[in-house]
Amino acid sequence: MTHTFSSLIALRPRELDAVLAAGATPRFSDLIGFEFRGWNVFGDPLAATVGTVMGIQRFAKGFFHRGAGAPDDAPYIEGYNVKIERGGSDEPWANKGGGAPIRHSFFRVLRAGEGDERRGRNQQALLLDYSKGDPRPGFFDGSGLRDFVVHPDPDIRDLLLGKAYMHIGPLANVAGYFVAERLRHHDFQGPVR
């Protein structure tokens, strides 16, 4: 089955788990230099209501590589989130406030199978580790998040499916899922150090 952004955001968590388990590992070069429009898929009605009220249903994720050499040879790449205006899944993705992107919640992207937080989960997925972001986010800006990301279809490189876990100490709970689709190119190389 060929998946699309619209078809994936309509699935239930159990169905998304099956797609994630069968997903393909993204290459770093599939991600670098692009921002992806994202849609959070919440597992229950309460979470959906809270997410809508907080304005986190829609977002964008971007990816960059600070190092020299080919990104696919790098031990990791980095990324960030962008605040997006509220709206439906079929409305244009506009930066919050209508101006330049507000980049926040930086994370490090680890290769498939790497990372202490896996605990045997999602070995074929990239790990987006917010605790290793630079600059490091605060608790309310995602430092407890760990996202596992795959391509739902191996031949469609502009579509991603993620499963987010919130880590608080030794506990890890599923925070939800997200679907992301390539939106635009960017030339951001990371915050100035």
Image: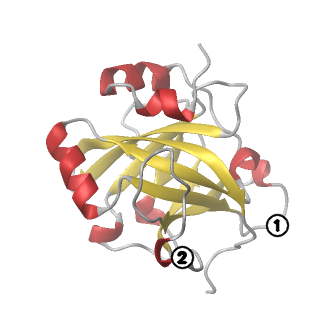
Q: Position of residue 172 (x, y in %)?
A: 25, 45
Q: Amino acid at mark 2?
A: Gly
Query: How are the residues colored?
Result: secondary structure
Q: Nearer the viewer, residue 166 or 40?
A: 40
Disc 2 versus disc 1: nearer the observer: 2
- The residue depicted at 59 percent of the width and 13 percent of the height is 1
* Residue 12 visible within the image: yes
Give the secondary structure at mark 1: loop
Task: Indicate left or right for 164 with 114 as reference.
Answer: left
Q: Which residue is label 2 attached to?
A: 98
For the C terminus, the quadrant is bottom right
Q: Amino acid at mark 1?
A: Ala
Q: Position of residue 38 (x, y in %)?
A: 50, 49
- The residue depicted at 54 percent of the width and 58 percent of the height is 93
Total number of numbered discs in the rendering: 2
Q: Earlier in the sequence, mark 2 or mark 1?
A: 1
Q: Which mark is residue 165?
A: none
Task: Indicate left or right for 71 with 26 as reference.
Answer: right
Q: Nearer the viewer, residue 9 or 170?
A: 9
Judged from this view, the residue extending furthest toward the top is 1
Give the secondary structure at mark 2: helix
Q: Position of residue 128 (x, y in %)?
A: 49, 51
Q: Which residue is label 1 attached to?
A: 68
In the image, is residue 168 above or below residue 23? below
Task: Indicate left or right for 94 with 165 as reference.
Answer: right
Q: Residues within 10 Å of mark 2 (few under 14, many from 20)?
A: few
Judged from this view, the residue extending furthest toward the front is 91
- The residue depicted at 32 percent of the width and 21 percent of the height is 14
In the image, is residue 25 above or below residue 93? above
